[in-house]
Structures are given as structure tokens and as C-alpha cells.
Amino acid sequence: MIFRSINEIVARYQPDAVVVESVFMHRNPGSALKLGHARSAAICATFEMNLEFFEYAPREIKQAVVGTGAASKEQVRHMIKHMLSLDGDPSLDASDALAAALCHANQRRLNLAVGQASAIAASK
């Protein structure tokens, strides 16, 4: 179901990249294993589109959106709602996904700026 759903989303919206949150094991190894299986199915569903793949740590995503890597899911949701001017509260899962996308957009913008600055410095 996950594979099929992600495959349909990718085919419909044709994204440029795949951004995922890296998996960490907190207390329950069984939950981490199940999450890994679901994550693998989602990632595999994007392979035929030959998309760039990016992975960010949960703390990195929270830092990019909230300003602290120790932010709660509710704090992430609050900032996503504010940053994107959403009328309602997205689900916690949706706000996590949006936070990962915003983290990547910020990182990509930073990488472009650094690359341009490096090119200018090298030409002098």
C-alpha cells in the first residue's frame, strides 16, 4: 500500500527530489524495524523516476524549522502552520513531512549561495 501510494504521488506531482528523515532508534527496536520497512517501501517507489535523494536527521529538520533540535512535534507543527500560513493544523505526520521539505529547501538555497560565492571568489 505504501509503495503504490508513493508511486502514484510521484507520478502525479513529478517532484525533483526525495527528502526523508533518517531513522533513529529511541527505545523500541521493533518500532524502528517497522519504520525501516515502511521507509524502504516509500523510497523504492521513487526509483523509476530517477530522483535525487536527500536524508536529514530529525534534529537537523527541527533545527531548520523551529530553531532547536530538541523541539517537540507540536512545536514543529506550530511553526509549519505559521511559516506556510495554513488555515488549520496539519497532522503531526504532515507537519513532519513539510518540515523535512522546508529543511531541504533551506539547505539547497544555502548550497547554491555558497557555490555562487565560491565561483566569484575563484574568478578573482
Image (spheres, rainbow, N blue to C red):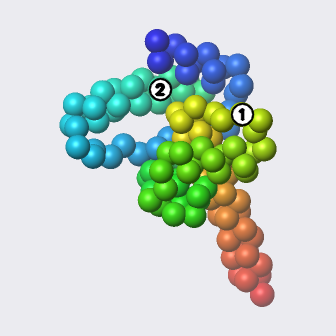
Mark 1 lies on a secondary structure that is loop
Q: Earlier in the sequence, mark 2 or mark 1?
A: 2
- Above or below: residue 100 compared with residue 71: above
64 or 80: nearer the viewer = 80
Is residue 101 visible to us here? no
Residue 20, given in percent of the width and then of the height, sits at 50, 41
Amino acid type of the residue tagged 2 in the rendering: Ala
Residue 44, given in percent of the width and then of the height, sits at 46, 26
Give the spatial CA distance, label 2 vs label 1: 27 Å
Q: Is residue 88 left or right of residue 95?
A: right
Label 2 CA crowd tier, 10 Å (few <14, some 14–19, many 20+)? many
Q: Is residue 98 left or right of residue 36?
A: right
Label 1 CA crowd tier, 10 Å (few <14, some 14–19, many 20+)? few
- Above or below: residue 53 compared with residue 112: above
Mark linked to residue 42: 2
Residue 107, given in percent of the width and then of the height, sits at 62, 58
Q: Quadrant of residue 89?
A: top right
Name the residue beneath numbered marker 1.
Answer: 88
- Above or below: residue 6 compared with residue 93: above
Is residue 6 visible to us here? yes
60 or 8: nearer the viewer = 60
Mark 2 lies on a secondary structure that is helix
